Amino acid sequence: MSSDVAQSAGLPETDCQSDEGPRIRADARRNRERVLLSAEAVFAEQGLAVPVDEIARHAGVGVGTVYRHFPTKEALYEAIVVRHVDALAAMARSERTDCEAGAAFFEFLSRIATEAQSKRDLTEALASAGVDVKAIADRAFSELRAAVGTLLTKAQQCGSVRGDVALDEVFALVGGACMGADHDGAPPVNRMVALVCDALRPPAR
């Protein structure tokens, strides 16, 4: 995780200020990242009721380290979701020049779908516990939406995407492809998204 993403998710002030300077800050960021990765894996496998002690054991840190970064489980849920959405937004913002916007746009749609499928167990665990993912990561989702909107506009300007396609339609189509791929006998998600991408391209002349 980049330092920008770590800072946007909010490191505790005690981890950012120390007499030992950069080394302590780097150690704190590494510990925070280990906790996030471990919590994500444990939540997806065992559900959200898993004790914090188990997350700490999995991460190889003390329980106090977990609570120093995330005072509550809700803060941990939020940080996990924000981390992923921030990463997707950063990817959309860093995509290539205007002349390559079409390829970048379609590649990004495939990445979103792949991420959604790989995080399905965690998403289902959060939903079953009544966690409103969109509400806890509203800022991150807004930034993702803006970044994808810019990428869509560039792709339309270079003629790679139909000009009559709206951003909400793009998200609805990709979301539908992901949900459809969950059904027995359905094509894999990459095939479903490939069909969506074909539908978004301008008709051949």
Image (cartoon, grey):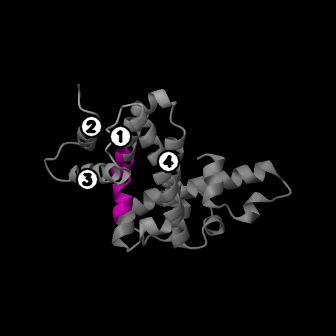
Please report contact status of discs 2 and 4: CB closer than 8 Å, yes or no.
Answer: no
Q: Secondary structure at mark 1?
A: helix
Q: Secondary structure at mark 3?
A: helix
Name the residue nearer the viewer: 89 or 38: 89
Name the residue nearer the viewer: 94 or 38: 94
Specify whether 1 is left or right of 28. Answer: left
Spatial distance from mark 2 to mark 4, Cα to Cα? 21 Å
Amino acid type assigned to the residue bearing label 1 in the image: Ser
How crowded pointer 4 is (Cα within 10 Å; few <14, some 14-19, many 20+) is rated as some
Q: Give the residue pinned by disc 1.
A: 110
Amino acid type assigned to the residue bearing label 3 in the image: Gly
Q: Secondary structure at mark 2?
A: helix
Amino acid type assigned to the residue bearing label 4 in the image: Ala
How crowded pointer 1 is (Cα within 10 Å; few <14, some 14-19, many 20+) is rated as many
Quadrant of res 133: bottom left
Q: Is residue 68 visible?
A: yes
Q: How many marks?
A: 4
Chain-order first, disc 4 or disc 3: 4
Please report contact status of discs 1 and 2: CB closer than 8 Å, yes or no.
Answer: yes
Where does the image place residue 172, in percent across and percent down from the top left?
30, 54
Please report contact status of discs 4 and 3: CB closer than 8 Å, yes or no.
Answer: no
Q: Give the residue pinned by disc 2.
A: 194
Q: Residue at x 33, y 71 (%)?
A: 128
How crowded pointer 2 is (Cα within 10 Å; few <14, some 14-19, many 20+) is rated as some
Dominant secondary structure of the magenta stretch?
helix
Which mark, residue 58?
none
Q: Is residue 114 magenta?
A: yes
Chain-order first, disc 1 or disc 2: 1
Stretch of the chain drawn in magenta: 113-124
